[in-house]
Amino acid sequence: MGTARTVRNADMLRDTTGSERRSRLLGRDVLHLGTTGLRARPTRAILSALGIAIGIAAMIAVVGISSSSQAKLNAQLAELGTNLLTVQAGKNLFGQDAALPENTVGKVGLIDGVEQAGSTAVLEGLAVYRSSLIDPAQSGGLGVEVVTEGLLDVVGGTLAAGDWLNAATAGYPTVVLGSKAAERLGIVSIGSIIWLGEQQFTVVGILDPVPLAPELDTSAMIGAAVATDRFGFNGKPTIVYERSTEESVADVRALLPRTVNPSAPEEVSVSRPSDALAAKNAADQAFTGLLLGLGSVALLVGGIGVANTMVISVLERRREIGLRRALGATRGHIRSQFLTEALLLSALGGIAGAIIGTGVTSVVAGLNDWPTAVPPEVLLAGVGATLVIGAIAGLYPAIRAARTPPTSALSG
């Protein structure tokens, strides 16, 4: 009889008129009660929140790094343009390597919409060395290419030092080195002498990396006149680069094979270098999905840690629960207290994780010279996910605490 009266007194209060009204708990009181357990055991709270923080930090960092890389790519494509097409010889009907005609660059320049055109031609059998004393086996994987005077503007390249080949220098033994070629040869300034095709050539220029034509980075580039005079160049290009207006890219791409080789257009291959950059980014995005999955597992483990902490907290605070119930707290009050505690614990981890993830993104972006790009919706989603996990993790302990009978809790 006494137990029933105690429970009834915990759930209902009577006013002076005899009518019954439910006991109410103000929001600020719920918040205060919810922080009691966290303040009483700060080390446990920090360790539990750390599991959530690691999961959220991993997910935000992965998304942030991917977004920063994408932002860098978009800026790069906006600067370099997506209107660059390359023309190469494919295979003939017998599976043998075909060749582009000597006048390919002139033909391409006659297509409506084409604004610039240039070409490169690989000189087979020629190697590049720092000097004649270098072992011939140590070529460094560098090649020799014949280039046209307008090529640099077509591919959007820039010079790190010196000048590009012109009508005057192209007829003499002068060479422009790609960025990697200069690095492997140990060339840091113009005027240096290198050994090219068993002859001395003077370096007149060094290129910066060329994103849309990476094959130039490992090349030593010379003019057509000196290539013809000293190495018997036949005038046939290996790759032709052209830039057209943005709106005419599709039309030009369709016309290029028939223009270059009317009798066998199937032997001409046309590609867009910017597509290769986009494909690389797509591959990075696929890897990002895998990392997100790993971050989700870490977040799940953090949620289990919160649930474990709350269950232990309920067991340790049975007397407190019984005393509050005996003094008038309803089951709803007890549920609110422990559910709020779980939400605060998860929110603490979520906010810390968002800060850590943003910091990691900023560091990685800074090291790679990317713009830092963390979508605000990702931060909100991350913190929101922690609240959902906190609610789920704290629901069972909260219900268990609310169902604890006051008498058994006090006697225990």
Image (cartoon, helix red, strand yellow):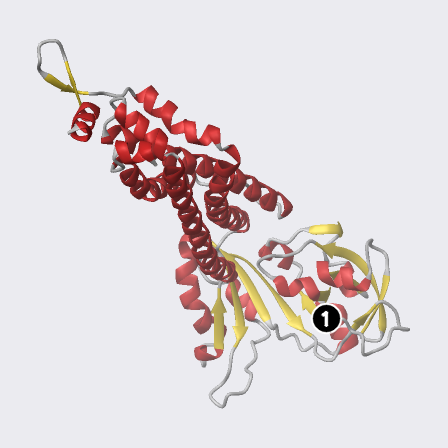
Q: Quadrant of residue 168?
A: bottom right
- For the image shown, how many numbered marks are present on the structure? 1
Foreground pick, 153 / 275: 275
Q: Quadrant of residue 31?
A: top left
Q: Quadrant of residue 386?
A: top left
| Horizontal and vertical percent position of residue 259 | 46, 71
Foreground pick, 400 / 409: 409
Q: Residue at x 57, y 58 (%)?
A: 212
| Horizontal and vertical percent position of residue 269 | 49, 73
Q: Residue at x 88, y 69 (%)?
A: 131
Farthest residue toward the top? 16
Farthest residue toward the bottom? 94
Q: For this view, does 130 lie left or right of residue 318?
A: right
| Horizontal and vertical percent position of residue 35 | 41, 27
Residue corresponding to mark 1: 144
| Horizontal and vertical percent position of residue 341 | 38, 33
Farthest residue toward the right? 133
Residue 230 seen anywhere in this rendered image of the structure: yes
Residue 373 seen anywhere in this rendered image of the structure: no
